[in-house]
Image (spheres, rainbow, N blue to C red):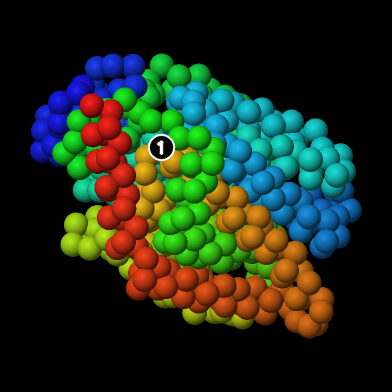
């Protein structure tokens, strides 16, 4: 694997593997499919509690503050563990980290069914967050080694649809199971299915050579991977201004997502007087997430095309997504008509998908392969720690300003506008230079290895 391999040649040879040999050319798309199912359960498990929360809070006697704390527990621990997870992922086989994380969070999900107090629920949600924190840094780093700049956004956008699929079906089935068997069985069934998926994929998922796609794009020899020290890795991230603007935008965007995950089912149950948890879960997820299923792939195709013209391409698409989504947050929070709420959620979801599809692809345009796991870990950390307090902020706004839950949620539109502003700063001042520096670093590493 020491000779230079161009992008055209790689179409025939496929992707070099960490253990030697080559994966078939089409295998890179099978990888996306396998990871799709893992990410499906990643999100199905985390949204289940929000759907059954109206019943849980009655059974366990929870107040608004306790509900908000439970919802934020996952986000905080997920975020706090992410930098550590990223550093680990840059130094171990990502296949191992992915499957280990899947088994861990699935077992914790099953144990959640034993909860008898808000403190136990808080603990299990925190533990689930710790298990899930390994997944996205590992999976996105792995996908980036199978897919270069010609297909990276499309691959990651297809993978992103698993988030919406897991949110939709996870919410619907959690509600159905809760209606017919009780809310505790939702966690038992979801967790058990995750363990089964991990066992099956252990035989099919393969580890790629780290940095393969970028070396092929640069037309340089496929060289032995370089392991950066912790200090070097952190310098790569912190000295790349584009990454810092992406971090800031993700904090704002994730603030809105966590608020929706925790409070939207309660808002819909109260505002629209919906009695069935299955209907609550369906309404809270179906319109938004199905629209995102269309928005993300369209965004992936558009971003890949724009990226071939300019290094700013992926971030331009992201900025358009968050700025277009902002007005529909206001409509969702203030409307009392089911049709208006459903329409606003669908429009919001489409543009959310446009932003989401390029979260990691934009960052990998400016971060060298050896630091991508850590960069993704820090992305999750700042996004979930900074944005994870969203449910508490909404609860405080509701109390302090004596407004309804819907009015407090509508104020979240400000966070999306701020996200768009941060992205525009990166587009205008930083991304073109940072992308060129990353390409030079890949070339220099390959040259030094030979």
Image location (x, y in percent) of residue 369? 37, 39
Q: Which image quadrant is residue 65 in?
A: bottom right
Left or right of 419? Residue 66 is right
Residue sitting farthest toward the front: 448
Left or right of 36? Residue 1 is left
The residue at 53%/64% (across/down) is 248
Q: Is residue 248 above or below residue 365?
A: below
Image location (x, y in percent) of residue 424? 40, 73
Q: Is residue 188 above or below residue 375?
A: above
Q: Secondary structure at mark 1?
A: helix
Image location (x, y in percent) of residue 187? 67, 36
Q: Is residue 426 above or below residue 441?
A: below
Give the quadrant of the C terminus.
top left
- Residue 446 seen anywhere in this rendered image of the structure: yes
The residue at 75%/76% (across/down) is 397
Q: Which image quadrant is residue 126 in?
A: top right
Give the quadrant of the N terminus.
top left
- Say few, some or many: other residues with alpha carbon within 10 Å of mark 1 (under 14 / 14 to 19 / 20 or more): many
- Residue 169 seen anywhere in this rendered image of the structure: no
| Residue highlighted by disc 1 | 370
Q: Which image quadrant is residue 85 in?
A: top right
Q: Please tell me how many numbered marks the rendered image carries.
A: 1
Toward the viewer: 149 or 110? 149
């Amino acid at each position: 694997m020491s000779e230079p391999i161009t992008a055209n040649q790689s179409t025939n040879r496929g992707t070099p593997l960490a253990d030697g040999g080559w994966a078939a050319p089409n295998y890179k798309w099978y990888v996306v499919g396998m990871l799709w199912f893992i990410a499906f359960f990643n999100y199905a498990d985390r949204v289940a509690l929000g759907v059954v929360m109206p019943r849980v809070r009655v059974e366990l006697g929870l107040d608004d503050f306790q509900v908000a704390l439970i919802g934020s527990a996952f986000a905080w621990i997920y975020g706090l563990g992410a930098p550590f997870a990223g550093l680990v992922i840059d130094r171990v086989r990502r296949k191992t980290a992915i499957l280990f994380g899947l088994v861990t969070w699935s077992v914790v999900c099953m144990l959640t069914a034993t909860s008898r107090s808000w403190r136990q629920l808080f603990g299990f949600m925190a533990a689930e967050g710790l298990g899930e924190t390994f997944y996205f840094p590992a999976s996105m780093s792995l996908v980036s080694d199978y897919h270069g700049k010609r297909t990276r956004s499309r691959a990651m956008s297809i993978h992103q649809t698993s988030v919406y699929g897991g949110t939709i079906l996870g919410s619907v089935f959690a509600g159905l199971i809760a209606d017919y068997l009780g809310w505790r069985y939702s966690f038992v069934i979801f967790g058990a299915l995750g363990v089964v998926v991990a066992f099956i994929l252990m035989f099919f998922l393969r580890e790629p050579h780290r940095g393969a796609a970028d070396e092929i794009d640069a037309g340089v020899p496929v060289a032995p991977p370089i392991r950066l020290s912790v200090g070097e890795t952190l310098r790569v991230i912190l000295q790349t201004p584009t990454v810092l603007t992406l971090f800031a935008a993700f904090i704002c965007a994730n603030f809105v997502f966590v608020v929706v995950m925790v409070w939207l089912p309660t808002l819909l149950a109260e505002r629209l007087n919906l009695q069935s948890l299955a209907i609550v879960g369906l309404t809270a997820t179906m319109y938004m997430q199905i629209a995102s299923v269309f928005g993300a792939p369209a965004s992936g195709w558009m971003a890949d095309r724009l990226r071939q013209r300019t290094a700013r391409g992926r971030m331009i698409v992201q900025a358009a997504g968050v700025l277009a989504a902002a007005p529909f947050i206001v409509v969702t929070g203030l409307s009392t008509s089911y049709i208006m709420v459903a329409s606003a959620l669908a429009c919001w979801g489409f543009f959310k998908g446009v932003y989401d599809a390029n979260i990691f692809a934009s960052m990998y345009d400016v971060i060298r392969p050896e630091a991508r796991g850590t960069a993704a870990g820090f992305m999750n950390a700042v996004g979930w720690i900074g944005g994870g307090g969203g449910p508490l902020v909404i609860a405080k706004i509701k109390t302090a300003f004596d407004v309804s839950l819907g009015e407090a949620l509508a104020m979240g539109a400000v966070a999306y506008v701020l996200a768009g502003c941060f992205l525009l700063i990166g587009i205008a001042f930083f991304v073109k230079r940072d992308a060129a520096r990353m390409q030079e670093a890949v070339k220099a590493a390959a040259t030094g290895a030979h």
